[in-house]
Amino acid sequence: MESPLLQSPGAVAADAPDQEVAAHYGEPSQEQRALERGTAFVDRGNRGVVRISGPDRLSWLHSLLSQHLDGLKPFEPTEALLLSPQGHIEHHLFLIDDGEAVWAHVEPGGAPALAEFLDRMRFMLRVEVADVSEEYAVITGPEGGGLAWPDVAGTFTRIVPRSDGFPDGLRPAGIWAYEALRIAERRPRFGLDTDHRTIPHEVGYVETAVHLNKGCYRGQETVARVHNLGRPPRRLVFLHLDGSVDRLPAHGDPVEVPGGRTIGFVGSAARHHELGPIALALVKRNVPVDAELLAGGVAAAQEVVVSPDTGANAQIDLRRRPAKHG
């Protein structure tokens, strides 16, 4: 659903998968700073919203998703993954229960397929699944209560009725502002920093969206095997890009070591108002952590996000930039 803010003076549409919202409104760096200060909001109304109601909803979702959801308290935000039977990530869900229903927001275009899958899995249980993306929108900005998740740089992401319009007294910031702050905090985004083969350990979702001591769920065998027996084939890295180059690498561009050998791909990239050009990439686990890289032809220095030793009962210690608050 195209954002009405795209008709604002100075608004520039973002690239896919965010083409329905604004990349920026003419002042990308100022919009980032305003979002950090709590004086701006980001319209993320292109994200999908799914509502799951009924008395069996939590135990049912618990049996399907990677997170421990049976007994989830009202208004306690969490994350979960829907995995394939082989353990590959199919959906990354941000979940919250309001006491009557579980609300989830997912990547743009993901709600119809997610709702269809969940509807097929209801069987005789007392649950109802609805794609409510046309009635509800996702907005990121200062704390506002309700269906809210803590997000980048001290912001909160909320699900709100589209009929409520946009927050008063705040300037709009484009999705570039949000993405720059997200990348700076080393937070992977499903569909950009992952591909069809990605498993949770590779990008650190085990820390945020997987419960390692719950019962069986779809794809659980792969998660358990990697965690107990072996390391994942790839790992997420943060890249400081050469600031003298006047372009950012594109999503999917190859990541190479000097000499031209491809060892991964660029996920998302942005220009941060303090750090300069930055990116996230997925590379082979055995690439030396101090190796200089080329990301889409741009020189890059890597920082470890997911340790090469993740799995095989190694402690998971994601190296993430602390969020700014206030």
Image (cartoon, rainbow, N blue to C red):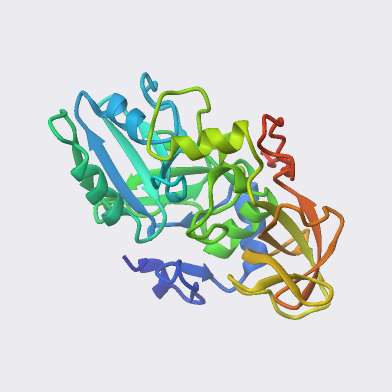
Q: Residue at the spot x=68%, y=74% of the render? A: 248
> Is 11 drawn above or below residue 31 in the view shown?
below
Q: Residue at the spot x=58%, y=64% of the render? A: 176
Pick the quarter of the image with the N terminus.
bottom left
Q: Position of residue 228 (x, y in %)?
A: 61, 31
Q: Residue at the spot x=54%, y=71% of the render? A: 25
Q: How many marks?
A: 0
> Is 16 drawn above or below residue 200 in the view shown?
below
* In the image: residue 313, left or right of residue 257: left
* In the image: residue 31, left or right of residue 84: right
Decide which of 161, 242 is in the foreground and name it: 242
Q: Residue furthest bottom?
A: 246
Q: Position of residue 70 (x, y in %)?
A: 36, 22
- Residue 72 placement: quadrant: top left
Q: Position of residue 314 (x, y in %)?
A: 71, 31
Q: Residue at the spot x=39%, y=45% of the render? A: 85
Pick the quarter of the image with the C terminus.
top right
> Is 180 drawn above or below residue 37 in the view shown?
below
Q: Residue furthest front?
A: 229
> Could you tell me if residue 125 is visible in this image?
yes
Q: Position of residue 77 (x, y in %)?
A: 45, 32
- Residue 282 placement: quadrant: bottom right
* In the image: residue 82, left or right of residue 40: left
> Is 246 drawn above or below residue 324 in the view shown?
below
Decide which of 27, 188 is in the foreground and name it: 188
> Could you tell me if residue 147 is visible in this image?
no
